[in-house]
Image (cartoon, grey):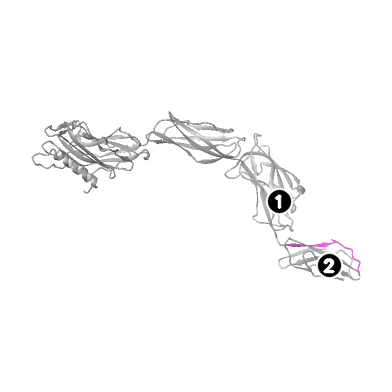
């Protein structure tokens, strides 16, 4: 086996120590070397019962037994036991190899960190050298010539060890004895059974508080629950009391249980009332155990139930009807126990907006309200105000959850310019639960963008004229178009020409902003009566008709 230079020096010094006690030219025999046992993380090995060992043991222990990060401790190397003592020990040498040398180290100088034990007695020659980079310590001692050997058991050497305060908690540390040689004064070897030491380096006793989830959304008047976990650091096992030092106004809380131990959990329930403004709140939970105290943040995001609008169609075109739906709640923010709702739907920029008026489907209840409510409305379409009231029917259950409550049907004039925006607002919102208590619903504005549909319509003026047989008359044909419509429309009479009449157009086509004349001639053979004349216009895109 090869060693670094300093380790080789250590071995040479130990050999020199034994040279002091060599007699009659006999070389020093080497004790048996045993392979180290596997590391058992998180456990401390113990000496097996002496009666099971053929040879006295050489083993190690830490003082104190439980070692703490950042605090020094002693590693004691012991030979023999009361039941299996070492006979006539005169000299001994060995190496201690330790793991995690980036965490544990031997303080300088070696003379104060590596010391002889009590078992060999005080009249000894002792050498101790630390090879810190490789995690090894070499030890050699011998009693002086003529002083004889010692029989018994006890500590043969002590090594002072310092650990890093930043070491991770519950770090397994291994100590292994290697290259063990022990002998009597006459040079005869002493066989020793070596045992490694597996121990654990703990952090100072402490605890950690963890709150899950980190942040949670909670609605006014409803409860949200967090879980608190207590984690032990450095063998901590005491009970910890949980409490909130202060709570923002409007919050109530419960903690069950109020005292927990490591690996146990507690549940925190928070309820913000209607006075708590929407926003994020950091509530500090304290855990106390004697002089130890830590805090964890319980983060609550207070929200209100939304009252918002949508349309059934993704694209709304001029001249076509659309339905505006009013929703209460959403999946993450449901409404609870809604019994009464009063709201005004206000439309701004309503120049082009048209309401269906007396149509019974113009305002209707939707699925979420179902059969539980009675709907009343007061429509002021000219000013763009639509006052709606929903009242729970007697004996019906209030609604909880989310979905559309009611809807209004609108349309726009087909002359509406492309990308016209109509703004809708929900104002004067009043909501009550079944106990008559206010529910806070947050209204959200909504915009409807009108996309132009290229279109035209024909109108005949006047609607009716009196014509005497043998004479003539005329009608004016007008065309209304959408904002960007610019096609030429060809005019045509669709209905059959009555007997004795002639009908033609001047001109026979029309464009936006112009008119045409529909000329009607009758002769004496025209039979008196009422005649309806239907005409149509055709563009490159579509065809429309009108009557005169």
User: Between residues 495 and 284, which one lies in front from this camera angle?
Assistant: 284
Q: Is residue 499 left or right of residue 380?
A: right
Left or right: 219 as drawn, with respect to 265? right
Label 2 CA crowd tier, 10 Å (few <14, some 14–19, many 20+)? many
Using the image, tell me which numbered label, if any, was put on residue 86: none
From where the camera sits, is residue 206 visible?
A: yes
Position of residue 304 measured from the top left corner of the image (x, y, whole percent) = 61, 40
Quarter of the view holding residue 291: top left
Q: Quadrant of the C terminus?
A: bottom right
Q: Secondary structure at mark 2?
A: strand
| Residue 110 left/right relative to 462 | left
Where is residue 74? Give x, y as percent. Answer: 28, 34
Asked if residue 389 is positioned above or below residue 239 in the image, the reply reads below
Q: Position of residue 131 (x, y in %)?
A: 26, 43
User: Is residue 342 in view from this perspective?
Assistant: no
Image coordinates of residue 43 in percent, x first then y, are 31, 38
Work out whether 247 lies above or below 483. above
Is residue 211 shown in magenta? Answer: no
- Locate residue 145: give its quadrant: top left
Separation (CA) of disc 1 from disc 2: 37 Å
Identify the secondary structure beneath mark 1: strand
**Residue contact between numbered discs 1 and 2, judged by CB atoms under 8 Å:** no
- The magenta segment is 455-471
Q: How many marks?
A: 2
In the image, is 115 to the left or to the right of 189?
right
Q: Which residue is mark 2?
A: 518
In the displayed image of the protein, which residue is found farthest to the left? Answer: 24
Q: Nearer the viewer, residue 359 or 310?
A: 310
Considering depth in this image, is 355 or 74 the residue closer to the camera?
A: 74
Question: Which mark identifies residue 409?
Answer: 1
**What is the crowding at mark 1: few (fewer than 14 residues within 10 Å), some, or many (at least 20)?**
some
Q: Earlier in the sequence, mark 1 or mark 2?
A: 1
């Amino acid at each position: 086996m090869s060693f670094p230079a300093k380790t080789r020096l250590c071995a040479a010094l130990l050999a020199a120590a034994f040279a002091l006690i060599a007699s009659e030219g006999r070389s020093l025999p080497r004790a048996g070397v045993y392979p180290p046992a596997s590391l058992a993380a998180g456990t401390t090995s113990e000496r097996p019962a002496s009666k099971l060992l053929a040879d006295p043991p050489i083993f190690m222990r830490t003082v104190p037994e439980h070692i703490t990060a950042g605090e020094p401790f002693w590693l004691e190397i012991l030979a023999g036991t009361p039941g299996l003592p070492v006979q006539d020990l005169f000299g001994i040498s060995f190496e201690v190899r330790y793991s995690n040398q980036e965490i544990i180290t031997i303080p300088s100088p070696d003379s104060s960190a590596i010391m002889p034990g009590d078992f060999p007695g005080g009249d000894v020659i002792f050498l101790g050298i630390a090879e810190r980079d490789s995690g090894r310590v070499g030890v050699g001692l011998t009693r002086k010539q003529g002083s004889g050997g010692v029989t018994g058991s006890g500590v043969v050497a002590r090594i002072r060890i310092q650990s890093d305060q930043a070491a991770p908690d519950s770090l397994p540390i291994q100590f292994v004895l290697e290259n063990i040689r022990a002998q009597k004064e006459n040079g005869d070897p002493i066989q020793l059974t070596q045992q490694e030491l597996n121990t654990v380096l703990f952090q100072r006793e402490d605890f950690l508080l963890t709150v899950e989830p980190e942040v949670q959304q909670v609605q006014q008047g409803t409860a949200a629950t967090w879980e608190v976990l207590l984690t032990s650091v450095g063998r901590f096992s005491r009970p910890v009391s949980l409490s909130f030092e202060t709570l923002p106004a409007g919050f109530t809380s419960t903690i069950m249980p109020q005292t927990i131990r490591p690996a146990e959990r507690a549940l925190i329930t928070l309820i913000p009332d209607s006075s708590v403004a929407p926003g994020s709140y950091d509530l500090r939970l304290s855990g106390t155990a004697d002089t130890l105290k830590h805090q964890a943040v319980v983060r609550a995001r207070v929200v209100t139930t939304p009252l918002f609008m949508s349309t059934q169609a993704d694209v709304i075109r001029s001249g076509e009807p659309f339905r505006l739906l009013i929703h209460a709640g959403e999946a993450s923010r449901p409404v609870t126990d809604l019994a009464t709702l009063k709201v005004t739907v206000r439309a701004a920029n309503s120049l082009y907006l048209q309401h269906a008026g007396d149509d019974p489907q113009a305002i209707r209840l939707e699925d979420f309200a179902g059969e539980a409510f009675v709907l009343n409305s007061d429509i002021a379409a000219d000013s763009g105000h639509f006052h709606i009231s929903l009242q729970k029917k007697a004996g019906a259950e209030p609604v909880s959850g989310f979905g559309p409550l009611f809807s209004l049907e609108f349309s726009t004039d087909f002359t509406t310019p492309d990308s016209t925006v109509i703004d809708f607002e929900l104002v004067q919102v009043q909501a009550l639960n079944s106990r008559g208590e206010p529910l806070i619903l947050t209204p959200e504005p909504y915009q409807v963008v009108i996309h132009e549909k290229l279109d035209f319509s024909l109108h005949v003026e006047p609607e009716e004229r009196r014509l005497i047989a043998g004479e003539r008359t005329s009608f004016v044909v007008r065309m209304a178009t959408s904002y960007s419509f610019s096609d030429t429309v060809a005019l045509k009479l669709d209905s059959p020409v009555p007997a004795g009449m002639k009908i033609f157009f001047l001109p026979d086509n029309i464009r936006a902003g112009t008119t045409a004349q529909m000329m009607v001639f009758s002769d004496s053979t025209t039979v008196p009566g009422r005649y309806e004349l239907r005409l149509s216009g055709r563009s490159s895109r579509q065809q429309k008709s009108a009557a005169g």
